[in-house]
Image (cartoon, helix red, strand yellow):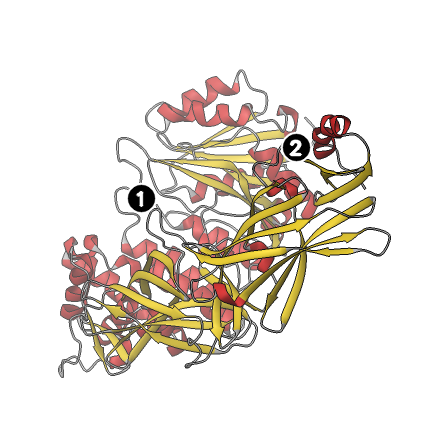
Amino acid sequence: MDSPKVSVIVPVYNCRASVEGTLRSVFEQTLGAERVEVVAVDDGSTDGSGEELDRLAAVHDGLRVVHQANSGGPGGPRNTAVRLARGEYLFFLDADDRLGPEALERMCAMADEQGTDIVIGNYVGVGRGVARFGATVPRVSVDDPDFDVYGRSLTAHKLFRRDLVTGNGITFPEGILSGEDKVFTAHALLHSAGVSIIADYDCYYLVERDDGTSIMQSGGAPAGPYFAKAARPLVENVVSHRKPGPVRDRMLVRHFQRDVLHRFNGRFLAAAEEAAQETESAVRALCDDYLTPAVLMRMPPKHRLLAHCARTGHSGLLREIVQAELDPDPVPVMVDKDRAYLLYPGFREPAAAIPDAYFDVTDRLKVERTLTGADWDGDVLRVRGTAAVDRVDDPARRVELVLRCKQSGEEHRLPAEHDGDGAFAAAVDMGAAASGSPLPAGTWDLHVAVTSDQMTKEGRFGADAAEGAGVPGARFVRTGEGAGALVTPFLTKGYGNVSFTVTPGTAGLEKLLGIDEIGWDGGARLRVRGHAAASPGSASLVRVGLRLERRGGSGERTGEVRQEAGADGLEFTAVVDSKGLAAGRWDVWLDLAVGDASARLRIPLATVPDVPAVACAPLGMRRASVYRTNGGNLAVHVVPGKVPSMARSAGRRLGRPRR
């Protein structure tokens, strides 16, 4: 075959039960068999996997099988296959796993289109957890601080441009049972010109063995080869390929947390003394060589303390800290003035002499908050929820609702009543929330702040809402003597946090108006009945008027309005007499006034539930009927004519737009 597009590399060791299904997922790729070669390397299997590969190769031309003596890990067979591969791209597939049918086609197309060196297809865990990606990213740099692709996934199950690998001498460590793929992938990422991520298709299925015999299920490689061939090369590659600074520090934090200090776990506590000492010694050497203060303090307290104990030889305290982390109850938190500390063993113990800063968790604590309800009470928006700082049990804490203007940054804090279980209630009085004055116009975001001792933690409010909890509708409220504003609560897009807009005067007031009925009263009197959502105290601020204006000429008729405060706001009935109107088309307007501010609005017929099918009034020698304009608004047509003909055509005019 001509040079294939992609070479799929499969290391095989005692996987007879699964290897056929794995290879079938390659043979059935939509990319096309002529563009895919498979290089499967049998690494000294003893369960018949080699024979199974030979059988499959006899019926699949694209499968090349290599047999070699056992090399002590998957790195050896992968290196063998890379030397033999002819594809433009390399893809590493384990013999327990499988590909989605379109995986190779999609990944190769992405690499071709974007010119990227590495493509990550989304992962699916079968019986195990995996890293998942929420959004497709056509191209990202490995150094990008906003999308830490380096820190999220270092498995080798990705598409690599072959020239990237062979041109930079990137190989897998050999003779090690685990961790070798991280070394290869990290080295490749450090040399890559760009990475693509495919999140909208499940490309790779990582399958956990049912019998628990995989090397990771049994604890990974022993300490000696692991630290010599995996952990140390990972750290040294970063130091040699990135200059000092935030990018290097971020990568080193990843490796010290997840590839060095993670070996202090339950297996470490259960290990033989010699193996445990080997782990401590290897960790100490790496910390002494590469763990800078900047990297140390970017890690959580647990990792700071483990590194400190390994460095200083506090073996007993190190074991106590590991055990505290393994215990079912979380490590307690203590607040002292404006700082919070995790109470791991050794905290403020003179013999340990560990700085408080190593236990400090202040900047990592978050406010756990829940919106349980929000309702209008007159001009007051009453907000209910729960709020507490994670892992801080403080019945005496203080809770505040924080209002922050998105446009100006202006901030106001309102005290909340709370109980010892975290429930709180706060009142936002729209006329006095701004330190006794009305809130200025703008968009206001709600935050909740919790203070214990002198430490205050704050979080945006609303996204973690209880079932059925939300925000009420918009309302017109009183904001001062003779003044009012439209207040519109809403949940932000994407996150669902609580915010509200304040719009003084009549601007936006049409959103609150509802027309309940349109009809003819007493023959020639047009009647419009409606309502507006407003607090009882502010309903009197709104004044409604009804007016007819003749289109294309002079003429105006003002109606009479009766309005009153109802249970849910302002209710009004407006009547205008059409007797004596000149022939022509008359637009219907609602006049609104709040204090010195005024506005006029059309009446959209689409919002009216029950307009009579026949809406016609006799005016002597003329007839008047209502109709819907092209804009969908209410208008009156005055024409000469007979009552019967007008009655028959009125329904048609309501249904068909007119100019």
Residue 54 percent location from the top left of the image: 47, 20
10 Å neighbourhood of mark 1: few (<14), some, or many (≥20)?
Answer: few
Q: Quadrant of residue 460?
A: bottom left
Closer-to-camera residue (502/444): 502
Which of the pair 425/343 is nearer the observer?
425
Tell how many labels: 2
User: What x and y, as percent, mark residue 22?
Assistant: 45, 27
Task: Tell me whether the residue at label 1 lies in contact with that at label 2, contact meaning CB atoms closer than 8 angstroms.
Answer: no
**Label of residue 216 in the image:** 1
Mark 2 is surrounded, within 10 Å at the Cα level, by few (under 14), some (14 to 19) or many (20 or more) other residues, namely: some
Is residue 13 depicted above or below 455 in this figure?
A: above
Task: Residue 72: give x, y in percent of width and height.
Answer: 36, 42
Taking 411 as reference, is 624 left or right? right
- Say what amino acid the circle numbered 2 marks: Pro
Residue where numbered disc 2 is placed: 4
**Which label sits on residue 564?**
none
